Each structure stands twice: as structure tokens, then as C-alpha cells.
Amino acid sequence: MKVLHTADWHIGKKLYEYDLYAEQVAAFEQIRQIARQKKVDAVVIAGDLYDRSVPSEEAVSVLKRMLVKLNIEDQLPLLAISGNHDSARRLGVGDEWFEHNQYFLKTELGIDAKGRRTLEPVELGNCQFFLVPYFNPKASRTYFEDDNISTMAQAMAKVVAECESYFKPGLAHILVGHCFVAGSSHEDSEVSSTVGGLDEVPVSLFKNFDYVALGHLHNHQALLADNARYAGSPVKFSLSELTNQKGVYIYDTETNDREFVPLKDPTPMVSLTGSLDELCQPAKYNEVADQAFVFVNLTDRQVIANLVEKLRACYPRLVHIERQNGLEGIVQTPSVELLKEANSPLKMTAAFFEQTQGLTLSAAQQDYLAQLLAEIEEEQ
């Protein structure tokens, strides 16, 4: 049996001011094509289908269309769980009748209307799938009726123990989860809430599973354990993911092979460093596709009027500007002693500028500042 593993679609997410629906749909169509080419037997979506717990109408429509294409048009079984960005209750509406078309969705630890516990496996082909939705220790205390659970590691140990109690020999055992596994790396587009390691789960807990299909972290190389992988997000959601190769995993239960299949970036993302004059040279901006998402690290020190408009004239999809030598670059604040020695507002401002920017005010700048301070004093 071949299983396609994807995760972290985050439908409805924005890149600063830009909607990413077009990019998400384009990536999805690639995933759909891979499923056909690889002749997969099922698709796993390991959480964070939506970006917000209350998704917009457009986000709901986009995700619905994606699931319909995979499950109904392509007749592929779907196995999905909720992530920390999803609303378990909202996403889970309809889960009982979804099963009749082989769309298996788990969003909460509990017991369903048929009396089945969440962790009871879904059996397809030669596989047992254990769908473990995102949860916190409080939810696990209720599910296991154990008030001694205080960390995710303790909770996941109980989850794994129950899953293993359902193991049938001769079948492949696949766990689908959405959590932070110890030893993984993560980036700013998925900020970890880990405090003192309380949310970390040891990868050794999963040693008895044939494959662990994870979601939560957006880099497919965040964890390279023998039997556990993060699929990563199919679209780049931040500058920190600039160099990440996006894709999906294909797990073959017959050979135990795990193949990473890359996706093409629907829209290029680039990071540029230079002065405004350098960045606005035709030789520079002509190298960048008009539709590219552009992050700029500006080296100019001076204040520049209409900066965004000037850059956007060259880079239509300008996303963000970082001032390399601006306030973001301050690493030292003026000492109290230095400010005490500056016995006038003019001297104090000049001292502040020199210590934070490493430059001395020019004569023209001092004259302008003196005039401005005089006007302020008159108004008072």
C-alpha cells in the first residue's frame, strides 16, 4: 500500500498583506498529480488544514473543493486530523458521515456516537492508521481519566500505549500526529509554544510504529528519524522558509521506503540586500519575476521619502522591508552617564544618534535639529 503524507496546508493564511489562495491551490494540484503518478492508495493530512480556528468563507470553500477532488473525484481514501490552528469542533462537523466515503477525520480525544474511542485504528488494506488529533494534557487527563498527566510526553506515552494495544500482527502500523517531537528544528512561521520542554515528545515513544506521519513543523527536514517524518507545508509561509524545499512523502508499506517528492514553488520568493539606488537599477529588478514575493534588506541609513512606493515600482509584490542600518540594527543604547553629560536637548539627541548609529550629525543636520527644537520650545 502506498500512502501520500502531507500536512500544514493552512488554508486562508496570508503572507503579510497577500492572500495565498492561488499558491495553495497550485500546490494542491501538484499534490493531486503526484498522487496519480505514484498510484497512491490513500492520502494522509497531518493537521492544520486551516490557518485559523474560525476560517473565512473563502477558506472553507477552497478546502472543501480540495477534499472533494481527492476523495470523490479521484476516489482516494483520506485520513486527516486537526492541528493546533484548527477548531476541532468546527473542522469535525460531519465526521460521522464522512466515513461512508472513506474520509476518516479525527479532531478530538473522546468517544464517538458509536461508542468508539478516538485512538481505535482505521483499517485500510494492509494498514492500521492511528489518527491522533492535536490535543493538550488537559484533554488527555479527561480521555484517560488520569489526573497525574501534566506534560505532553506523559500524555503521548499513554496515547502510544493505547494505540499499541490495538496492534494486529502482520499489518503495517501508521500513526498520524500533530505535535513537536524532541530534536526537531522549527521556524518562525510556526512558533513553538514549548516552555521548558513541556510540549516536547520523545521520538523514542514511536519506535514500534512502521511510520509516523507528522504535522506542525513546516520543514520536511525538521526531523529525520528512522520511522518518523514531518511532511512540511506545501507552500512557503515566511522568509525563514526561503530555502526550504516543499513537497510530500510517499510511504510504501510493502518495501518500507519513504520517498520525498518535491513540489515546485507556485510563486518565487526572494530576499534582496542593497541600497535603494542599487535595488532600483534595471539590471537588478529585471532579474526578479514580477510575480515574486520580495523581501528587502535595505542598507541605506538615511530617511527615504516614499520608500515603499519607490521599491514597489520595481518589485510589484514587495512583502517586507528590513532596515539593516536602521533602528532594527541597534545593539546598544546610550549610557546614562553619556546622557547626563549632554546638558541640552540638542547635545542629547546628537549623543543618542552617534552611539546608536555610529555616525556624527552633520552641520546641516545639527542646524535643522536646532531649528526644530526651538520651534518646539516656542510652542510650549
Image (tube, grey):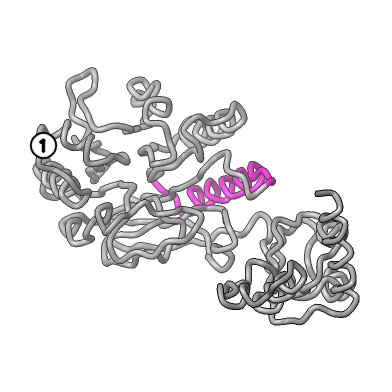
Q: Nearer the viewer, residue 223 or 306?
A: 306
Q: For numbered disc 1, what is the local secondary structure?
A: loop
For the point 11% across and 46% down, which residue is it?
A: 161
Observer-nearest residue: 115 or 348?
A: 348
| Region of the chain picked out in magenta, as a range | 17-40
* Residue 26 is inside the magenta segment: yes
Question: Is residue 323 rendered to the left or right of residue 262?
Answer: right
Q: Position of residue 29 (x, y in %)?
A: 59, 46
Residue shown at 71% from the left, 74% from the top: 353
| Residue tagged 1 | 147
Image side of residue 184 versus residue 262, left or right: left
Where residue 27 appears, as percent x and y from the top left, is 58, 50
Q: Is residue 364 magenta?
A: no
159 relative to 337 in the view: left or right: left
Work out which residue is located at the far top of the displayed protein and give it: 113
> Where on the picture, by quarter, is residue 62?
top right
Above or below residue 216? Residue 69 is above
- Report the amino acid beneath label 1: Asp
Instruction: Give the camera-side residue of 204 and 312.
Output: 312
Q: Say which quarter of the image contains residue 289.
A: bottom right
Count of number-bearing discs = 1
- Residue at position x 58%, y 57% in the image: 238
